[in-house]
């Protein structure tokens, strides 16, 4: 049970764009994460020391948040350097955008924005960013910045249209921004089913849907959609999910009912038992919907992400309040086509096994034989009537790579039916 790591808040919480959502790659765990810690007390940012310059304390005492009338020469010099670097960065971003435009033209006259999008190339660019990173900024921060640059470069053609489980302020929306950057056109939709439908109909270029949570397990409704949908998985996003208790008044003593999505209630079970054992718990379709309802009464609260609090003007009563501090949700990006290998990919398969002894062992052996690792296996009723189970399996590799291609050919003989749901880059930072 959680005994520390959340704080009760008194004021309206500040916009924490991106700072409450980080990922859980091995590399990121190694680096010190300012943004994966519990909310810190407000403090003055520390500038990184510029090469060859030492910062002396400015003479005279300044009030917090203000500066002495005469700025010290050292401070002025440091700012001059920053100004120069900013000019340089800006020129380079402009130059990059021009080249990205030329790349777009080199692709020929394509029908729509989605045809210019290359997730495998973006993954390669971002992996290089991570490989090059020597600090002081951590991998997540740098990946986020470069994501935004690529997002803006691509949007020169036309912004991508991305469907997600709305309304505004959901963790799904955060996952959209994390994967595609902010230069997109987001389409908040009413259900996961609708996200699939809008991508199938071509009204959205891609959709982002939650598939599993580290605390709560699989989101069955998403997996079940793949049983009948022809859509392909083109990416995955891992999002550190922090839950907050949000209300209009910001006072815990006022709260008699709490709205949230069932998954979020489950993620905060111990906290609720300890601090709000008597409050009525009301399940709704999303956390953002919970926040929307909580804004209408002082005795109501919502469990949701910080961004939902910003969207609906709620105060943070306490947070983060999830029982497990590593609470992470994995989302899938769904689209209409398969993309080429990025060099570090995962393949998701749906395998309908034959109703015979050893069937599961048989269907997995073609991968094991070739050293292809299985990251995940999940069984669901097959919905076919005749065949009892469908297995969702994630394997390391891409369908266009020889070992995977051979394994799939062998598998075709052993399984009742095999559906390739997608081959896509492994989530980055
Ligand atoms: O390399 C490409 O194909 C590009 O279109 C350029 C670029 C980029 O900005 O780096 C932009 C969009 C694509 O999704 C991938 C990369």
Image: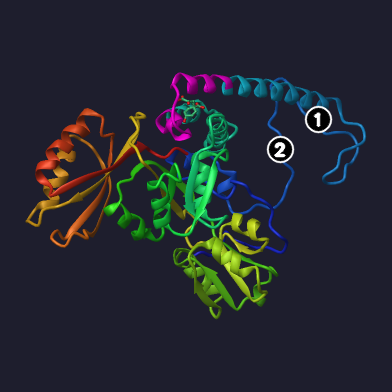
Q: CA distance from mark 2 to mark 1?
A: 13 Å
Most extreme residue toward the bottom is 278
| Residue 427 image-quadrant placement | top left
**Which residue is painted at 7% across and 56% down in the image?**
356
> In the image, 139: left or right of 249?
left
- Between 194 and 164, the one nearer to me in the picture: 194
Where residue 304 sits: x, y (%)? 55, 61
| Mark 1 burial class by Cα count in 10 Å: few <14, some 14-19, many 20+ | few
Q: Magenta part of the protein: which range?
A: 98-123
Where residue 203 sits: x, y (%)? 45, 46
Q: Mark 2 or 1, which is nearer the eye?
A: 2
Per the image, the residue denoted by label 2 is 46
Most extreme residue toward the left is 357
The secondary element bearing badge 1 is classed as loop
**Which residue is painted at 50% across and 42% down in the image?**
161
Where residue 360 sits: x, y (%)? 14, 51
Per the image, the residue denoted by label 1 is 56
Q: Is residue 16 on the magenta stretch?
A: no
> In the image, 231: left or right of 146?
left
**Which residue is painted at 67% across and 74% down in the image?**
298
**Residue 269 visible somewhere in the drawing:** yes
- Label 2 CB, ligand 1: below 8 Å? no
């Amino acid at each position: 049970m959680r005994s520390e790591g959340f704080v009760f808040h008194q004021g309206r919480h500040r916009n924490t764009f991106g700072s409450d959502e980080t990922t859980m790659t091995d590399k990121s765990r190694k680096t010190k994460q300012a943004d994966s810690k519990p909310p810190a007390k407000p403090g003055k940012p520390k500038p990184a020391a510029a090469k060859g310059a030492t910062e002396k304390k400015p003479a005279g005492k300044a009030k917090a948040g203000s500066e002495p009338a005469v700025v010290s020469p050292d401070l002025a010099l440091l700012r001059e350097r920053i100004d120069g670097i900013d000019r340089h960065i800006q020129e380079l971003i402009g130059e990059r955008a021009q080249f990205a435009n030329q790349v777009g033209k080199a692709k020929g006259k394509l029908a729509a924005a989605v045809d210019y999008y290359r997730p495998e190339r973006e993954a390669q660019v971002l992996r290089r960013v991570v490989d090059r990173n020597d600090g002081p900024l951590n991998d997540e921060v740098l990946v986020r910045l470069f994501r935004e640059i690529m997002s803006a470069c691509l949007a020169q053609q036309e912004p991508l249209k991305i469907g997600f489980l709305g309304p505004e302020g959901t963790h799904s929306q955060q996952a959209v921004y994390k994967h595609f950057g902010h230069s997109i056109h987001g389409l908040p939709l009413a259900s996961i089913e609708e996200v699939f439908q809008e991508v199938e109909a071509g009204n959205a270029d891609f959709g982002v849907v939650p598939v599993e949570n580290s605390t709560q397990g699989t989101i069955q409704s998403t997996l079940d959609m793949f049983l009948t949908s022809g859509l392909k998985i083109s990416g995955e996003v891992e999002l550190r999910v922090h839950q907050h208790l949000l209300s209009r008044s910001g006072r815990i003593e006022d709260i008699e009912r709490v709205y949230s999505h069932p998954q979020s209630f489950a993620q905060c079970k111990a906290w609720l038992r300890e601090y709000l054992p008597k409050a009525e718990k009301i399940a709704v379709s999303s956390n953002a919907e919970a926040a929307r309802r909580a804004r209408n009464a002082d005795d109501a609260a919502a469990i949701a992400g910080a961004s939902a609090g910003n969207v609906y003007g709620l105060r943070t009563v306490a947070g983060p309040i999830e029982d497990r501090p590593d609470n992470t949700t994995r989302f899938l990006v769904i689209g209409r086509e398969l993309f080429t290998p990025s060099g570090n990919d995962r393949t998701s398969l749906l395998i309908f096994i034959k109703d015979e002894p050893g069937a599961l062992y048989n269907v997995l052996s073609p991968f094991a034989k070739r050293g292809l690792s299985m990251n995940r296996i999940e069984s669901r009723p097959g919905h076919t009537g005749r065949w009892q189970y469908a297995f969702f399996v994630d394997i390391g590799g891409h369908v266009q790579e020889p070992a995977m291609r051979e394994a799939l050919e062998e598998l075709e003989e052993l399984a009742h039916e095999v559906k390739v749901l997608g081959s896509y880059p492994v989530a980055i930072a």
